[in-house]
Image: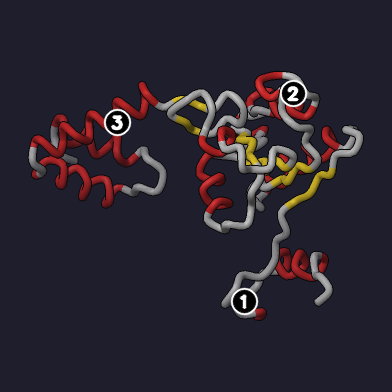
Amino acid sequence: MFEGPVQDLIDELGRLPGVGPKSAQRIAFHLLAADPVDVSRLQEVLQKVKQGVMFCDLCGNVSADERCRYCADARRDPTIVCVVEEPKDVLAVERTREFKGRYHVLGGALDPLAGIGPDGLRIRELLARLGGTGPASDEADIAEVIIATDPNTEGEATATYLVRLLRDFPGLSVTRLASGLPMGGDLEFADELTLGRALSGRRAL
């Protein structure tokens, strides 16, 4: 334990996701030894993130304007919407360079143990988009919703809940990201669930 502000800084850094006690200590002492100009620049960026970053009024992604760059891009297909949990998931899908539609960010996943129910997610906004109301009422009808929640317990529960809600929309195709074996992996090291998903999702060649 260190004294005063140094320990306070270590404690706060340690609350960040993925930062353990040793990493928090290293970052704290790096900041302590850093040039005051660098520390001031970090402070300014942190303030700008909290004060200047908005959320897209259509999809919920982080944005510098009312509409994020994906919703504002007329070249993207407005009839296909990929539903993800967090803004970071948008970047993960974009890195594939395979998806040319638009997004809907839920803001998390269903997790009753943590007190996160349907009302805590942007599910109403998704239903409004599908119903032709809300900010996107003048846009093309959505023909397909791709559910791209995480392949864990919370993500699967969220996907199941969404499928139940969306299957009543006439003419709407609801799909789920396929899951299976990673490239470069060995079959013997795959867990039963992953291997089972790969078998059930097999496709003709």
The quarter of the displayed image where residue 139 is located? top right
**Mark 1 secondary-structure assignment:** helix
Q: Residue at x 61, y 42 (%)?
A: 75
The residue at which mark 2 appears reads as 128
| Above/below status of 6 relative to 128 | below
How many residues crowd around disc 1 within 10 Å: few (fewer than 14), some, or many (20 or more)?
Answer: few
Between marks 1 and 3 in the image, the one whose residue lies nearer the viewer? 3
Residues 142 and 123: in front is 142
Residues 139 and 55: in front is 139
Q: CA distance from mark 1 to mark 3?
A: 42 Å
Between marks 2 and 1 in the image, the one whose residue lies nearer the viewer? 2
Residue 104 locus on image (x, y percent): 64, 36
The residue at which mark 3 appears reads as 46
Residue 164 appears in the picture as rendered: yes
How many residues crowd around disc 2 within 10 Å: few (fewer than 14), some, or many (20 or more)?
Answer: some
Q: Earlier in the sequence, mark 1 or mark 3?
A: 3
Which residue sits furthest top?
134
Q: Earlier in the sequence, mark 2 or mark 1?
A: 2
* For residue 136, side relative to residue 15 (left or right): right
Q: Residue at x 31, y 27 (%)?
A: 48
Between marks 3 and 2 in the image, the one whose residue lies nearer the viewer? 2
Q: Which mark is residue 18?
A: none
Residue 63 locus on image (x, y percent): 47, 31
Q: Amino acid at mark 2?
A: Ala
* For residue 43, side relative to residue 110 (left or right): left
| Above/below status of 21 relative to 70 | below
Q: Residue at x 68, y 42 (%)?
A: 77
The quarter of the displayed image where residue 37 is located? top left
The residue at which mark 1 appears reads as 189
